[in-house]
Amino acid sequence: MNIAMHISNGIIGGPVSLAYGVVAVVLLAFCLSKARQDLSERLAPMAGLVAAFIFAVQMLNFPVLPGVSGHLLGGALAAALVGPWVGALCVSVVLIVQALIFADGGLSALGLNISNMALLGTAVGYLVLVGLMKLLPRTAAGVGLAVFFASVLSVVLASQGFVLQFVLGGDVPLTIGYGEISATMAGVHALIGVGEGLIAAVTVTTVAKVRPDLVYALHGDRLARPAESGLPTRTFVLAGLAVAAVLAGGVSYLASGDPDGLDATTLTGCTVDADGVITGGSCIAQQAADHELGGSFLADYGITGVDNATGLAGLIGVALTFAIGLAIFWGVRRRRTAAATAPQAPDTVGAEK
């Protein structure tokens, strides 16, 4: 079962991939510095949960057209729950785990994928959320409606991020123009965005009803004080992890095996056989190269030597993503706490006569 979901090696030329990698590193460092202002004792585990949940739901490809599937990108969902800075980091953690552990998305393309999904997708999702929350009531229903439209727009614009990358660094002689690629990506991803919007709306609405203080979009700032009648944060996070485990460990077996919107677009212009192997024509996918870790233990969301192990691989992925995310966010929070409590040097100006 091939459920790889992101840009592969070779699709975009080396110089452009490197440039996007540098940009991604710089912007993620900026997000880390800004996230320090938001991370609190409750937000750190919540951020780890958001990363694990996005990993799980990204395994659930759903059909959008005959022979084409879609999956969650997660930028608007993360922005709604934990804010733009932490949200971008959450999606980045997912992409890094997928690339390094599951050979999903080329290592040389990691900066490209982070730029589109974690940075552009989260930024667009957050800006749309901010605008809509000025018009909608700050209720569970209001934030659910806002995150639906934010998801649709963020997915479509993230897809155009790939089009720009291909314009800059693609060198395949194609029988279709850039305008057709852009239109195809936009149309397919608009449908994917509707699916993502429904998932994000249900998720955020549910959280808003159970623990409204844990929904960043309802407050526009650091998380509010916990609701007196809400679930304890630890219980809420454990319950969320259980849901993610069920999705990745069980529901993932029901996911569509068709290529996702990106892969389907990169195959436009080529003919493929029943196994998905290109047999003729000219298309973007012809430039795709094998993943550097394609033979690793958990490559392609399976387990070497174990048949039909997608669910078990998914469970491992949820656990790893949560653990890595939690470690990063706790580390950032502790640095913030240490900086806040560090003794200040006395003001000696004018002390000497």
Image (spheres, rainbow, N blue to C red):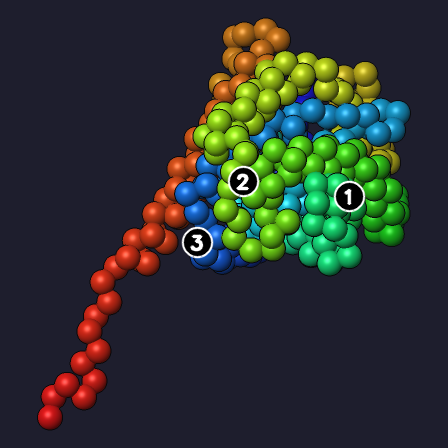
- Within 10 Å of disc 1 (Cα), the crowding (few <14, some 14-19, many 20+) is many
Distance between the Cα atoms at labels 1 and 3?
29 Å
Check disc 3 and give the amino acid type. Arg
Residue that sits furthest to the left in the current view: 353
State whether residue 159 appears in this view: no
Sequence-wise, the earlier of marks 2 and 1 is 1
- Within 10 Å of disc 3 (Cα), the crowding (few <14, some 14-19, many 20+) is some
Foreground residue among 50 and 29: 50
Of badges 2 and 3, the one in the foreground is: 2
Which residue is rendered at x = 77% and y = 34% of the image? 198
Check disc 2 and give the amino acid type. Ala
Which residue is rendered at x = 48% and y = 34% of the image? 233
Query: Where residue 345 sits: x, y (%)?
Result: 21, 70
Label 1 SS: helix
Label 3 SS: helix
Distance between the Cα atoms at labels 2 and 1?
22 Å
Residue that sits furthest to the front in the current view: 228
User: In this figure, which residue is indicated by the disc labeled 3?
Assistant: 36
State which quarter of the image contains the C terminus. Answer: bottom left
Q: Is residue 202 left or right of residue 43?
A: right
User: In this figure, which residue is indicated by the disc labeled 2?
Assistant: 227
Of badges 1 and 3, the one in the foreground is: 1
Foreground residue among 183 and 296: 183
Distance between the Cα atoms at labels 2 and 3?
23 Å
Q: Quadrant of residue 327?
A: top left
Query: Where residue 167 sits: x, y (%)?
Result: 75, 53
User: In this figure, which residue is indicated by the disc labeled 1?
Assistant: 145
